[in-house]
Amino acid sequence: MRLSRYFMPTLREAPSDAQIVSHQLMLRAGMIRQEAAGIYAWLPLGLKVLKKVEQIVREEMNRAGAIEILMPTLQLADLWRESGRYDDYGEEMLRIKDRHERDLLYGPTAEEVVTEIFRAYVKSYKDLPKNLYNIQWKFRDERRPRFGVMRGREFLMKDAYSFDVDEAAARRSYNRMFLAYLNVYARLGLKAIPVRADTGPIGGDLSHEFIILAETGESEVFAHRDLVEMGAPGADIDWNGDLQPLVEQRTSLYAASDEMHNQARFEAEAPEDKRMNARGIEVGHIFYFGEKYSKPMKALVAGSDGVERPVHMGSYGVGVSRLLGGIIEASHDDAGIIWPDSVAPFGAAVVNLRPGEASIDAVAEQAYQALLGAGKDPVLDDRDDRPGAKFASLDLVGIPWQLIVGPKGVAEGVVEIKRRATGERQTLPLEAAIKAIC
Ligand code: ATP
Ligand code: MG
Ligand code: MG
Ligand code: MG
């Protein structure tokens, strides 16, 4: 990609209604455009990052044994009448009528649809466990859409749904998602804390929210510091083995959201210097709810004894579009966004300081082709602009590496590279520079 032909409408200043830094930077970097309150168009740079985040979520879901499907955004109200949620859901649900006066809705979540799919095909315990997920737009008519993609009305969610023969099996499915989530956030460069969340009437301990720390977050978290510092389990887990010890290692340390917090327990379970109380952003939520939908919707499976019983379900959500805001809140400086390499819109920018000057163009082109060949997804900054303006916009949009080609270096047979995160610069021959970046 050549920046001279690209569409990257950066802004010098953020519109005054953007209150938090991630929202300001997403607007300034030309990633999103608000079309209505809480409804955004994704511009090229924003879309590239969104797709990369989505792909990481997808890879980790697949690794943990979940299977991707795609459910529609529009759902029949009748399904929600079956589960009993149509009237309960309230004003967050966007209700729509088609030309035949049938009630539809723009899905805020998909338990009903996935249960309908499941019950149509799966009848026996022999076909279990199953975990079906999709990455699809949701709509919730939030009372206060704000902070850009953090609380949108239309937003992208990964939602997975597990189906098991009983509660013990459901716990195994839950454990897989619990650990897969930690791996997702770690690959995004985030430290996410799994905190106990409300299980509602079902009770038990199988509901966790995943919170990343940020002062502007809308959630409050209380947690043992050792949990905050604990690393993700990593990819080489035996997903079919016993995951309970890995989960317990994390759930035995105190961590709760404000609704679930109990100060006396906190003080009993964590020594004073290990108690952390901070604000954060909910970037995921996993939840076992048993027969809540399968019973009223008659999603039954025959057990080994031949008796049909409602299947045990859980649901597992990741706020994919919200994560972009979360990553920026966690990783930026005065100059702009600092993308982790894993989701950066481009892996590196080749900055041509003298576009149109043949000897410089040739080296820039050579650098660009080498990075392209190495799979770095580079961009060539061949814009006819002041060097200062070019650097400022590349810093703003957060490209992790700059490879700078100018007349002085070319005369000496070297280029300069700059690491966005640290500002560290090195002057090297082209080949060594490419090697350092890749
Ligand atoms: P919140 O407490 O922020 O309103 P929620 O608890 O209502 O979120 P869930 O139903 O648990 O959300 O949905 C799963 C995930 O979807 C959340 O953890 C969050 O990351 C994301 N999400 C929920 N609502 C929004 C929204 N309005 N905009 C962007 N992402 C959202
Ligand atoms: Mg909500
Ligand atoms: Mg919540
Ligand atoms: Mg939630």
Image: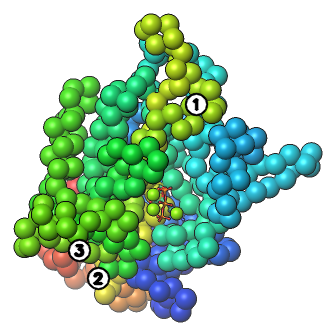
Number of numbered discs on residues: 3
Q: CA distance from mark 3 to mark 1?
A: 39 Å
Neighbor class of circle 3 (other Cα within 10 Å; few <14, some 14-19, many 20+) is some
- Tell me if residue 370 comes above or below residue 3 in the rendering: above
The one of 125 and 324 positioned closer to us in this rendering: 125
Q: Check disc 3 and report the residue beneath it.
A: 277
Colour pattern of the rendering: rainbow
Give me the residue at 34% from left, 69% from top: 258
| Residue 295's disc number | 1
Give the mark nearer the N terminus: 2 vs 1.
Answer: 1
Instruction: Pick the quarter of the image with the C terminus.
Output: bottom left
Secondary structure of the residue carrying tag 2 is: strand
Neighbor class of circle 2 (other Cα within 10 Å; few <14, some 14-19, many 20+) is some
The one of 240 and 406 positioned closer to us in this rendering: 240
- Tell me if residue 115 comes above or below residue 424 in the rendering: above
Neighbor class of circle 1 (other Cα within 10 Å; few <14, some 14-19, many 20+) is some
Q: Check disc 2 and report the residue beneath it.
A: 333
Q: CA distance from mark 2 to mark 1?
A: 51 Å
Q: Nearer the viewer, mark 3 or mark 1?
A: 1
Q: Position of residue 192 (x, y in %)?
A: 28, 60
| Residues under numbered marks 2 and 1 in contact, where contact means CB atoms less than 8 Å apart | no
